[in-house]
Amino acid sequence: MTNPQSHSEVIPEVVFLGKLIRQALKGKIRVPKFQRSFVWRQQDILALLDSVVRGYPIGSILVWETETTIDSDSKIGPVEIGRCPPGHIGYLLDGQQRVSTLVGTLCLDENGESVMEQVDWRVYYDLDTSEFIRAPRGGPKPQHFPVASLLDTVNFLRVTRNIIASGQDDDKAEEWLTKADRLANALRDYQLPVIRIRDADLDTAVTVFARLNRTGRRISADEMVSALTFRSRADFYLARELDEFVNTLARRGFGRLDRVLVLRSVFAALDLDIYAKDWADLMVKPDVIARLPEAFQSAVGGISRALNFLQDIGVVTDRLLPYGLQLVLLGEFFRSCPQPEPDQRALLERWFWVTSFTGWFGQASTSRITHALREMCDFADGQRTDLNTIDLDAPALSFPDRFDGRSARVRAFLLYLVSLKPRSLVGTGELDCGNLLSTLGTRAVGHVFQRTTDLEDLNSSPANRMFVDQEVTGPAFHELKALNDDNLQELLPSHGFTAESIRALRDGDYAGFIRARLDSLMAGEREFMRERKVCLPVGPIGRVVADSDVSDADQ
């Protein structure tokens, strides 16, 4: 496929895995500096290897081939690769995580450092269980075949000789050797599609990438912007800067925030439309390129100060943040006004609680959000003393009819629940709810009772969910029933139960137990709203909408 205007070619082909790896080791395939760093987790690595040996497709690899020298990494994963040879070099535009996994695990030096990028690249195949694993505690056993020896003939023979000499009975040794041989053949025979974009400039290559992926995984906004700005600003790698900041967010409990939210903050700092349809056109403008590093640092500084503000009012993890866009707007305020006056801070707090309980961001158009952002900037600069785009006197949404961590209204409820300082069910003292949510997701808010007809219509109600200790794996009911009355009288109010509900628990009136808690939670949450100057909801209970723009993958 040839473009007559640019003389670029799009060349689809299918290559054997071994050929792709050899090209990478020779330096013919490289990771450009504008790419993100390696972000996969250990389980992702093991899953990819399992897909390959089973012959499952793992998607196409997209390579931009050019004779233009582009700043690139000297490694793929943990493996050093050759210097750039003369002629065309293939720079990975899509498939970096997959290629890094394959090269890193199959070509890792026997004596090299194996733990990099927070994963262990030294992977083994358990010939007994037929699964890929990390090195087991106590070291590998004879049945643990090192993946890095599978495609290296000399090392493969050495490992197989060790299996024969390990003292296993002949049948077991033969079974293992047969499995190892099949495993190596599966890797050698594996083929994967590679799409090469040759002799195109980077703008064209990225455009082709976007179009090729129109029905599949489209290039993300931050990848596209980083690639395009790289040509004009080779000393600033936006994707890497984003990765570092996302790691900082993760250490603060906000690692699930979409990178695009951070990019929107950068656009706001550049005084650009955060909802512009073609960011690529905007980012190649020389004045934007020149201001990008400073704008990035300014934006992340604002976000960091906004996080301090949120954590002060109880939002200690992204699992408790109703909308990521709240952070974008607050970040823009704190970027311009690092130390607000007391009346400004009080209005920001009310703004946050109203937008959380009313679901404003879930219903607002992009033009309304853009207007609210401009208003927030004017408020930060002292050009106005109010925030009118959002009706601060609008009534809150009714109490949610079911628990769904993807709902901003449910997250607002969780903020109330956290404010009660829930106590441990199995120990003493308060639970660290923020850490539990960051670690376990919605599993930190376990069921009081498993689904049962005894609860009538309350099975899915938030009243049937409560914060539990990490070691509690079943319904909390079992832990509650095992406590004596004195302990229950101390614990139950911290979870929104009334002390009088102990009798219903002891009598086996589970529906009455949860219904009493529902009434208590609704009344307590309303008082929580009053204290934060949020107008009370019109109705008692309303339907939940999954409208949060913050990831809740464990849902």
Image (spheres, rainbow, N blue to C red):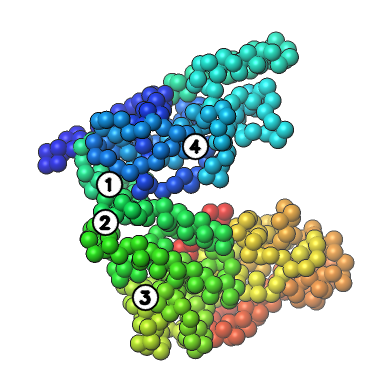
Position of 493 with respect to 156 (left or right) is right
- When the figure is inspected, residue 508 is found, relative to residue 76, above or below; the finding is below
In the depicted view, which residue is nearer to us: 343 or 452?
A: 343
**Could you tell me which secondary element the residue under label 3 belongs to?**
helix
Q: Which residue is mark 1?
A: 206
- When the figure is inspected, residue 10 is found, relative to residue 405, above or below; the finding is above
Residue 298 appears in the rendering: yes
Q: Which residue is mark 2?
A: 280
- When the figure is inspected, residue 268 is found, relative to residue 86, above or below; the finding is below
Rendered residue at 66%/68% (across/down): 463
Rendered residue at 57%/54% (across/down): 554
Residue type of the residue flagged with mark 2: Ala
Q: Which residue is mark 4?
A: 78
Residue 192 appears in the rendering: no
Q: Are marks 2 and 1 in contact (CB under 8 Å)?
A: yes
Q: Estimate the spatial distance between the alpha carbons at disc 2 and disc 4, rounded to whole Å.
A: 32 Å
Going from N to C along the chain, the mark reached first, 2 or 4, is 4
Q: Estimate the spatial distance between the alpha carbons at disc 4 and disc 3, rounded to whole Å.
A: 43 Å
> Which mark, residue 373?
3
Rendered residue at 26%/54% (across/down): 232
**Could you tell me which secondary element the residue under label 2 belongs to?**
helix
Q: How many marks?
A: 4
Q: Image quarter for residue 368?
A: bottom left
Rendered residue at 47%/55% (across/down): 244
Q: Estimate the spatial distance between the alpha carbons at disc 3 and disc 2, rounded to whole Å.
A: 22 Å
Residue type of the residue flagged with mark 3: Leu
